[in-house]
């Protein structure tokens, strides 16, 4: 059977295919290593996106403050 470890991560497989892929993983060190590496990468990605560094927070706050005068909406009518 084909090396389909990455499709496990996608959730793209039907139940029988998931089972077959797990069976395949038992006998295929290459897929196990690839899957473990991908899971580490995804976990790192999840950590990064949930905790923004303070420098990024400050930069986004500054850009929002700078952009405010050009925003249009209910608030911009008050001064006109
Ligand atoms: Zn494999």
Image (spheres, rainbow, N blue to C red):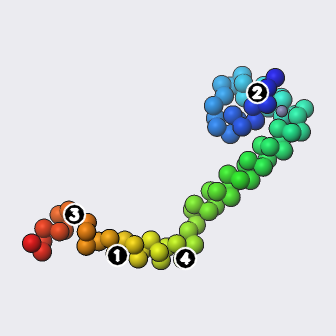
Badge 2 density bin: few <14, some 14–19, many ≥20, Cα 10 Å: few
Badge 4 density bin: few <14, some 14–19, many ≥20, Cα 10 Å: few
Quick check: 12 above or below 51?
above
Q: Where is residue 29 shown, x and y percent of the image?
A: 89, 39
Q: Nearer the viewer, mark 2 or mark 4?
A: 4
Could you tell me how far apart the alpha carbons at marks 3 and 2 are, in whole angstroms?
54 Å
Judge: label 1 CB < 8 Å from ligand 1.
no
Judge: label 2 CB < 8 Å from ligand 1.
no
Asked whether the beta carbons under mark 3 and mark 2 sit within 8 Å of each other, the answer is no
Q: Which residue is mark 2?
A: 19
Q: Nearer the viewer, mark 3 or mark 2?
A: 3
Asked whether the beta carbons under mark 3 and mark 1 sit within 8 Å of each other, the answer is no
Q: Nearer the viewer, mark 3 or mark 4?
A: 3
Q: Earlier in the sequence, mark 3 or mark 4?
A: 4
Quick check: 12 above or below 16?
below
- Residue 72 bears which disc, if any? 3
Q: Earlier in the sequence, mark 3 or mark 1?
A: 1
Asked whether the beta carbons under mark 1 and mark 4 sit within 8 Å of each other, the answer is no
- In the displayed image of the protein, which residue is found farthest to the left? 80
- Residue 77 bears which disc, if any? none
| Secondary structure at numbered mark 3 | loop
Q: Which residue is mark 1?
A: 65
Could you tell me how far apart the alpha carbons at marks 2 and 4 are, in whole angstroms?
43 Å
From the viewer's perspective, tell me whether residue 43 is left or right of residue 78. Answer: right
- Residue 54 bears which disc, if any? 4
Asked whether the beta carbons under mark 2 and mark 4 sit within 8 Å of each other, the answer is no
Along the line of sight, which residue is nearer the eye, 63 or 8?
63
Residue at 12 percent of width and 71 percent of height: 78
| Secondary structure at numbered mark 4 | helix
Q: Earlier in the sequence, mark 2 or mark 1?
A: 2
Q: Earlier in the sequence, mark 1 or mark 4?
A: 4
């Amino acid at each position: 059977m084909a090396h389909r470890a990455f499709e496990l991560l996608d959730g793209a497989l039907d139940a029988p295919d998931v089972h077959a892929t797990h069976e395949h993983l038992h006998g295929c060190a290459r897929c196990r290593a690839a899957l473990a590496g991908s899971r580490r990468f995804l976990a790192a990605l999840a950590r990064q996106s949930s905790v923004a560094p303070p420098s990024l927070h400050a930069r986004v706050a500054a850009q929002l403050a700078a952009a405010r005068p050009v925003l249009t909406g209910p608030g911009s009518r008050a001064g006109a």
